[in-house]
Amino acid sequence: MKLKKRNTKKEDLTDIVDKITENFNEELDEEVKEVEEFIHDETEEVEVTEIKKEPVKEIKKEKEEPMKRRTRKKFKIDLSIIIFIAVLLLAAGIVIFLTVGNGGSKYGERLKGIEKISFTKKDKNKLIDEIKKNENVTSASLDIQGKILYVMFNVKEEVSLDDAKNIANESLNNLSDAVKGYYDVNYLITKKDEKGTEETKLDENGDEKKIIHKEFPISGYKRKTSDHIVW
């Protein structure tokens, strides 16, 4: 039995090819669309990411700059406060050291019992006034430092050294025993008009040199435990 060869018409082949081509184009179009959509989505994400990142950077910069300024300002303020407190403490320490000291006085316990000694303004004036009454005295003054009485007076040009010392010795009679037993007394006697004695000597080069010797000023000191002045 012979099989008859089937004759395929030309039109049928053309239809088949068209269908295959149509299906292939449809599938190709779908794949192209998917690729385009994917590319489009990636592009949008990149753009969105870039748009979002840039403002964040700007915001960070804007935040960092004020924070730095605030930090520097705070540091300056803190440093100023520290310096002010240090200066204040130093000043307070100096004041306490000079005024309060040990026992509330710069002399500390050295003036203990001074409140029991009667040495009034009247007594002080009497001491100086009696010295000034002496005809050989031109000026006199009194200064008190702690437990020391500083008595200073100036004598005339013709007053001798011994006479000046006697004026000081006699002034002690104007102080009470309590005052003399508590205070030390320091005397300084000057003679502003003193001419002195002139002496001629040879210096190291053999030249004559005039030297003037003066006896004044002189100083004497009487301790509270002593009855006389040591010159």
Image (cartoon, rainbow, N blue to C red):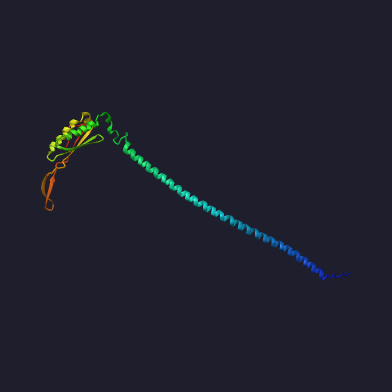
| Depth check, front residue: 94 or 194 | 194
* Residue at figure coordinates x 56%, y 54% from the top left: 55
Relative horizontal placement of residue 224, taking residue 163 as reference (left or right): right
Image quarter in which the C terminus is found: top left
Is residue 170 visible from the viewing direction of this image? yes
Tell me if 48 is positioned left or right of 127 in this view. Answer: right
Q: Quadrant of the N terminus?
A: bottom right
Where residue 147 appears, as percent x and y from the top left, is: 25, 34
Question: Measuring 27% from the left and 33% from the top, which residue is drawn there?
Answer: 111
> Going by the image, does 169 lie left or right of 5?
left
For the image, the number of numbered tags is 0
Most extreme residue toward the right is: 1
Q: Nearer the viewer, residue 106 or 175?
A: 175
**Is 172 in front, or is 23?**
172
Q: Is residue 55 above or below residue 162?
A: below
Q: Quadrant of residue 135?
A: top left
Q: Position of residue 57 (x, y in %)?
A: 54, 54
x, y percentage for residue 153? 18, 38
Answer above or below: position of 211 versus 14.
Answer: above
> Which residue is rendered at x = 35% and y = 40% of the image?
93
Q: Specify whether residue 152 is in view.
A: no
Pick the front one: 118 or 22: 118
Query: Where in the figure is residue 51, as x and y percent of width and height?
Result: 59, 56
